[in-house]
Image (cartoon, helix red, strand yellow):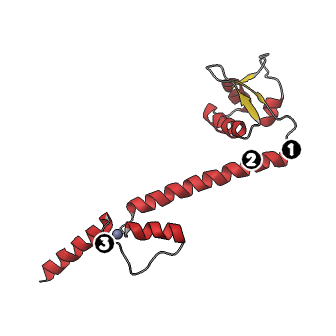
Amino acid sequence: MYQALACPPRDGQEAWELRGLAAALRLSVSKVQVVLALLRDAGVVRAGRGAAVSLGLRQVGLEADAIDRLVEGYTARRQRDADAIEAMVDYAQSGHCRWVQVLGWLSDARPTGWACGHCDNCGRIAEAQRAVAGGAG
Ligand SMILES: [Zn+2]
């Protein structure tokens, strides 16, 4: 994409526009938008606003390792986002004490043998224990 933007558009336009760039790269518009957002945030690409987005390079002659660093940064950020979503799903689906989970994230050492006794999961555990005790007695 960087190399494409360094060249003039094939159709004789003054600047690249989103659909023309996607067609030239044989990528979907949404994929091009993701990469453009990364390059724009890094100050590599300028993108005008409006329906006909005009695109161009702010930084010309960027080395391959600089582009590799941008990709690594994006990959790391994407992994962090995926980890955060996984942690939220674990939190939502877990049957363990909510406070024990939160303390585990904050300290990397979950308290063992302790529960708050007040969260929704502790309430459910206590209710189940009462039901078992009542059924046995
Ligand atoms: Zn609890």
- Which amino acid type is marked by label 1? Glu
Residue 69, horizontal then vertical, whole percent: 77, 50
Q: Residue at x 19, y 76 (%)?
A: 130
How packed mark 2 is, by other alpha carbons closer than 10 Å (few <14, some 14-19, many 20 or more), is some
Label 1 Cα neighbours within 10 Å, binned few <14 / some 14-19 / many ≥20:
few
For disc 1, the marked residue is 63
Horizontal side of residue 137 vs 4, given as left or right: left
Residue at position x 69%, y 35% in the image: 36
Q: Is the residue under label 2 in contact with that under label 1 (CB below 8 Å)?
A: no
* Residue named by callout 2: 70
| Ligand 1: quadrant of the figure | bottom left
Q: Seen in the image, is 72 located left or right of residue 120?
A: right
Q: Nearer the viewer, mark 3 or mark 1?
A: 3
The residue that mark 3 highlights is 117
Q: In the image, is 14 to the left or to the right of 48?
A: right
Q: Secondary structure at mark 2?
A: helix
Q: For marks 3 and 1, give the CA distance.
A: 57 Å
Q: Amino acid at mark 2?
A: Leu
Residue 136 figure quarter: bottom left
Does 65 sit left or right of 33 as displayed?
right
